[in-house]
Amino acid sequence: MSNASCATVKKWLAHHLPRDVSAAVDRLARTDDAQHIAVMPDVHLSAEVCIGCVLATTHLIYPNAVGGDIGCGIATVALDAPAEVLADERRAAGLLRALSSTVPANRHATADDPSHSWPADNSHRLSEPRLQSIARRDGAVQFGTLGRGNHFLEFQADEDDKLWLMVHSGSRAIGQATRDWHIARAIRSSTGLLYLDAESDDGKAYLSDMQWAREYAEGNRRAMVQAAADVARDVLGAQMIEASYFSCDHNHVRRERHFGDELWVHRKGAMSARAGEAGLLPGSMGTESYHVKGRGCEDSLCSSAHGAGRLMSRDEARRALKPREVEHQLRGVWFDHRLLSALREEAPRAYKDIRAVARAQRDLTRIVRRMRPVLCYKGGS
């Protein structure tokens, strides 16, 4: 199968595209059944398909245009306390200690605790016994865990200095396993990218398993929000305002109507931004984040950036940044100083300026609330 012509490509850029990113976007535009591509201002290089790209096809599904952390996204909720409750260093340290045991980075010690268990009978919905086994094993002990890298749990203050909680995480091991299982059964396109036909048995199985992983990821975020809110109640005396909770994910594929056609819209590091749709645009560690509303821009396939986007690779950040510089960049934000060396990869300078990203997509979203970080909890690298 081959494309008669390239897909239309629309770009919203905060910085000039590096040559390797431009080449990856060009390759995606030439791949089989690519109809439309939208490049977000947080775009950066990733395996096969760049993070910050949106791809629309008529019938082919590209698992690598979704990525391995299926359903990864952001959740937030307000607390009934002012940000000043975290002005005290001892209280902040107590909160960090409690979070480290309540919201582990990797896995819970046991899957028996109902506060973080994922219903075992859900695993039967997955298409293969191998995936069902991973869901019952790793899926159980990883449910309610943060993950590492750029995943975070942050206490933030809005413009009225009211306290909020924000969590960034996804589907953990089961998302990666789902992508890898189906990639092994995919067909190689004319550009080398691997696809499944949405109408084939393999394509239908991927779509079903992908949806399962999205639901797991959303449940994972909710579990962590609840666990962190319980910690905030115990340490800060702050209650969660449940009605304020909302969440969005930025790694998925779904059927949508655009330009008069029914299309499969793949988002890898891009969130849906339909007119009036609530979204969350986090900055890098130590920088501001935004609550946004979508403007429904059709040229962007009603999508927007999912965050600041990497400016340096992890290796580059480790080489370029010293722990003391990271500490300076995070001045005014509580965090675990024992992780300083590991956090070089996640320092603000390793990412694009979130303000520039927001400016570059003014016709995609509007900012409705600005958030500043107060305390950031991460699992290291």
Image: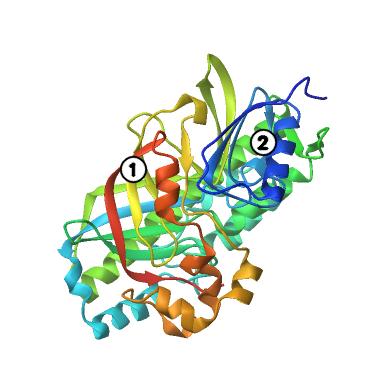
Left or right: 114, with 90 as reference point:
right
Q: Position of residue 235 (x, y in %)?
A: 23, 76
Q: Identify whether 317 is placed above or below 365.
A: below
Q: Amino acid at mark 2?
A: Ala
Q: Identify whether 339 is placed above or below 161.
A: below
Q: Amino acid at mark 1?
A: Val
Nearest the camera: 312 or 336? 312
Q: Residue at x 28, y 53 (%)?
A: 370
**Quadrant of the drawing holding the C terminus:** bottom right
Q: Position of residue 242 (x, y in %)?
A: 23, 51
Query: Residue 39's quadrant in the figure?
Result: top right
Q: Identify whether 219 is placed above or below 96.
A: above
Query: Residue 334's quadrant in the figure?
Result: bottom left
Q: Residue at x 45, y 48 (%)?
A: 357
Q: Position of residue 114 (x, y in %)?
A: 40, 62
Mark number for residue 50?
A: none
Q: Identify whether 182 is placed above or below 277.
A: below
Q: Residue at x 47, y 53 (%)?
A: 119
Judged from this view, the residue extending furthest toward the top is 260
Say which element carries label 1: strand
Judged from this view, the residue extending furthest toward the front is 16
Q: Which residue is mark 1?
A: 292
Q: Position of residue 251 (x, y in %)?
A: 55, 45
Mark number for residue 205?
A: 2
Mark 2 vs mark 1, foreground winner is 1
Label 1 crowd (10 A; few <14 / some 14-19 / many >=20) = many
- Any part of residue 111 in sight: no
Say which element carries label 2: helix
Q: Residue at x 50, y 75 (%)?
A: 109
Is tag 2's residue or tag 1's residue first in the polypeptide sequence? 2
